[in-house]
Amino acid sequence: MKWFFTFASVVVLLDQFTKKLAVLFLRDRGTVTIIPDWLKLTYAENNGIAFGVEFASQAIMILLVGSISLMIALYVLKSGNRKTLFLLPFSLIFGGGIGNLIDRLTVGRVIDFIHFDLYQGTIMGSWVSLWPIFNVADSAITIGACMLILLHNRIFPEPDAKAENHVR
């Protein structure tokens, strides 16, 4: 569990540090272009979850994120699996959840600032921005979830059929 909490702590610290920088340097300044027409730093506050979807009050969101984070930690603890490949994706998701939870508890919303400006304009008469503004915690959650999907068979290997059936 030491590595699980170490990885998660690194995510939380990096997330909170970069959000403090965003508040200091971006909140009153607006947008800073890093790579023209592609990558910007844009300060935003988000009441919702992924892609800004709002489906519940902040109190419910805090309860939900807190509960999911607790369930992840309990699952990892009870699993007994201490392999890095198992711990890393769960610690990324856990750390990202805690990072955004800290924002919800202290600011009342989540601070976002990384902005990939892939396309903004109208599609079939509706204004769209194809990529939401996000933060380090969101990135950690996404990377952890992708690892669970893409590396599922390595993270959760099937038990050997012969050993399971005691066949020789």
Image: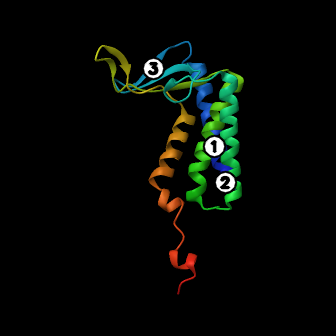
Residue type at mark 3 is Val
Q: Is residue 137 above or below residue 33?
A: below
Give the spatial CA distance, label 1 vs label 2: 10 Å
Label 3 secondary element:
strand
Does the rendering let one see residue 13?
no
Q: Say which residue label 1 marks.
A: 94
Q: Position of residue 70 (x, y in %)?
A: 71, 43
Q: Earlier in the sequence, mark 1 or mark 3?
A: 3
Q: Say which residue label 2 marks.
A: 76
Q: Which image quadrant for residue 77?
A: bottom right
Label 2 secondary element:
helix
- Numbered disc in front, either 1 or 3: 1
Image quarter where the N terminus lies is bottom right
Proximity of marks 1 and 2: CB atoms separated by less than 8 Å: yes
Q: Position of residue 106 (x, y in %)?
A: 71, 24
Q: Is residue 8 above or below residue 58?
A: below
Labelled disc at residue 128: none
Does the rendering let one see residue 49?
yes
Q: Earlier in the sequence, mark 1 or mark 2?
A: 2
Residue type at mark 1 is Phe
Q: Earlier in the sequence, mark 3 or mark 2?
A: 3
Residue at 52%, 13% in the rendered image: 29
Q: Say which residue label 3 marks.
A: 32
Residue type at mark 2 is Val
Give the spatial CA distance, label 1 vs label 3: 30 Å
Give the spatial CA distance, label 3 vs label 2: 39 Å
Q: Is residue 102 above or below residue 68?
A: above
Disc 3 residue crowd, few under 14, some 14–19, many 20+, Cα 10 Å = some
- Numbered disc in front, either 3 or 2: 2
Disc 1 residue crowd, few under 14, some 14–19, many 20+, Cα 10 Å = many
Q: Position of residue 16 (x, y in %)?
A: 64, 32
